[in-house]
Image (cartoon, grey):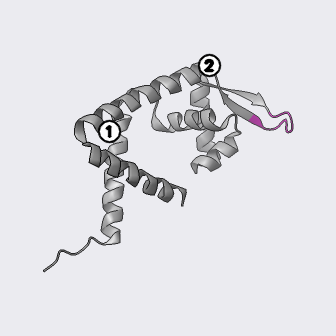
Amino acid sequence: MAARAPSTSLLAHDLRETVGRFVRRLRTEPGPPVPLLTVLSRLSREGPASISDLAAAERMRPQSMAQTVRELETAGLVSRRPDPQDGRRSFVELTAAGVAKLEATQAAREDWLNQTLEAELDADERELLRRALALLDRMAEA
């Protein structure tokens, strides 16, 4: 009797569990907590943004994003400047310290990933993972 293909719901469960373990492992590397790092990364990629725009992009409540931005401001990693078009609104932007912290954290985490990929996966497995990333990226955009 041929083995049955796993159900989609089992695949979804296994994917969630595995990605969760992977993210938790990555979080053990030095650097700011993931929610703070996510905001720093978005500001680096997309430039200054309002708290409401950041909240929408990260699918967070504006109040939660405001707290995250306050933490980053307190650490000197971001600053706010008034929106010249709307005085009630401000833009959040990276400071030089924020850029340096982001670059150092990304470098350390990518170094861990690089070492782990080299040590744990052979060339064929790395290529398979490269192809799977495209699928994960497509799912993330859905």
* Span of residues in magenta: 83-90
- Nearest the eye: 3 or 62: 3
Q: Residue 11 carries which label?
A: none
Q: Is mark 1 on a helix, strand or loop?
A: helix
Residue 24 in the magenta stretch? The answer is no
* Image quadrant assignment for residue 109: top left
Residue 60 lies left or right of residue 30; in this view the side is right
Question: Which residue is located at x 53 percent, y 38 percent?
Answer: 38
Lower sequence index among marks 2 and 1: 1
Residue 4 image position (x, y, % from top left): 22, 75
Name the residue that disc number 1 marks.
Answer: 25
Residue 123 lies left or right of residue 74; in this view the side is left
Name the residue that disc number 2 marks.
Answer: 96
Residue 28 image position (x, y, % from top left): 34, 33
Marks 2 and 1, how far apart in space?
28 Å
Quarter in which the N terminus is drawn: bottom left
Question: Which residue is located at x 27 percent, y 70 percent?
Answer: 6
Predominant secondary structure, magenta span: loop
Residue 130 image position (x, y, % from top left): 39, 48
Residue 86 in the magenta stretch? The answer is yes
Q: Say how many tags the image has.
A: 2
Q: Answer above or below: position of 11 versus 105.
A: below
* Image quadrant assignment for residue 93: top right
- Nearest the eye: 35 or 74: 35
